[in-house]
Image (cartoon, rainbow, N blue to C red):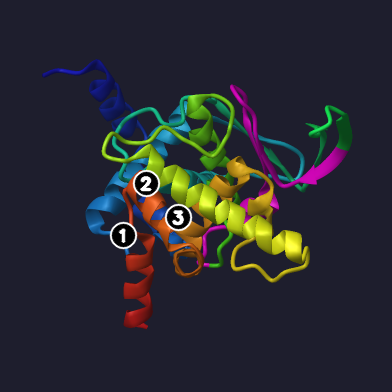
Amino acid sequence: MWSLSGWLKHRTLARNPVDPDLWSRVRQRLPILDGLTAEEDRYLLDSCVLFLHGKHLTALEGVTLDDESRLFLAAQAQLPLLALGDLNWYQGFHEIVLYGHDFISPQKHRDASGIEHEWNGEHSGEAWLQGPVILAWPGVLASGGWEAYNLVIHELAHKLDMLNGDANGHPPLHNDMRIADWVGAMQGAFDDLNRQLDANPDADTAIDPYAAENPAEFFAVTSEYFFSGPDLLVQAYPQVYQQLKAFYRQDPLTRLTALQAGT
């Protein structure tokens, strides 16, 4: 059946071809893409073109964007969606704002007694509900390896979380996933991490202690680990890994293990 959206995508791709050498350079800078099949690679590239066509990148002072930089960012943004089909998962925003450095952001928090606290926090990334994604360019450039760090994936995981409203660590699950399984795995691991930090705030936890801030940050951090440090995540919280595997419909650990065996 003829599809207007399919025709528009085809036209966008036809009008925005990517030089294979350019894509090769981007791939070399992103080890987390190693192990993708040729079909996945082609799909990811097409997704990057459509992403860059649909989102506006605003580069502030200290950030210079060329075609390679834009693709470098887009590939990390699209990796989590690689197996999720053509649904508009990033429908909640139209702009990515890129700072040349970490930025100061006003913060508010109401504690259990009802007292509201305000302060200025230095951040490398933020995702606003029905607003832009904000990224510090040095953090983007530091992402893309198997070091259990990826600023782009972290902030865009918040956008997936926000598809149900406010970020709460509970993105819209697929029909073949059980809410009870998700909540049991995520809440159990979140509570375990908080118990460790309550006992020793300086504990050398298996994953970034920032994940203990709240359920939304736990989902974002574990999504980050899922794609860039899957071996660490599965060792620390195997049930969380299995739930993220079901949600993202990918298995980065298998890719990483095959790469390690090959080297």
Please tell me which residue is depicted at 58% across the width and 52% down the height of the picture: 190
- Residue at disc 1, secondary structure: loop
Identify which amino acid the numbered label 2 is placed on.
Answer: Tyr
Q: Say what secondary structure mark 3 lies in.
A: helix
Residue 234 locus on image (x, y percent):
44, 65
Residue 193 locus on image (x, y percent): 62, 59
Magenta stretch contains residue 126:
yes
The image shows residue 47 at horizontal and vertical percentages of 36, 39
Q: Amino acid at mark 3?
A: Val
- Label for residue 112? none
Q: Determine whether the residue tagged by mark 2 lies in a helix, strand or loop.
A: helix
Whether residue 48 sits left or right of residue 7 in the image: it is: right
Q: Give how far apart the Cα atoms at labels 2 and 1 are.
A: 15 Å
Which residue is depicted at the point 49% across and 36% down? 170
Q: Position of residue 59 (x, y in %)?
A: 67, 37
Residue 240: assigned label: 3
Front-most of residues 250 and 77: 250
Q: Mark 2 or 1 closer to N-term?
A: 1
* Rendered position, 246 above or below 241: above
Give the labeled residue for mark 1: 36
Please report the bounds of the magenta region as a residue range. Answer: 120-146
Residue indicated by mark 2: 248
What kind of residue is marked 1?
A: Leu
Q: Quadrant of residue 36?
A: bottom left
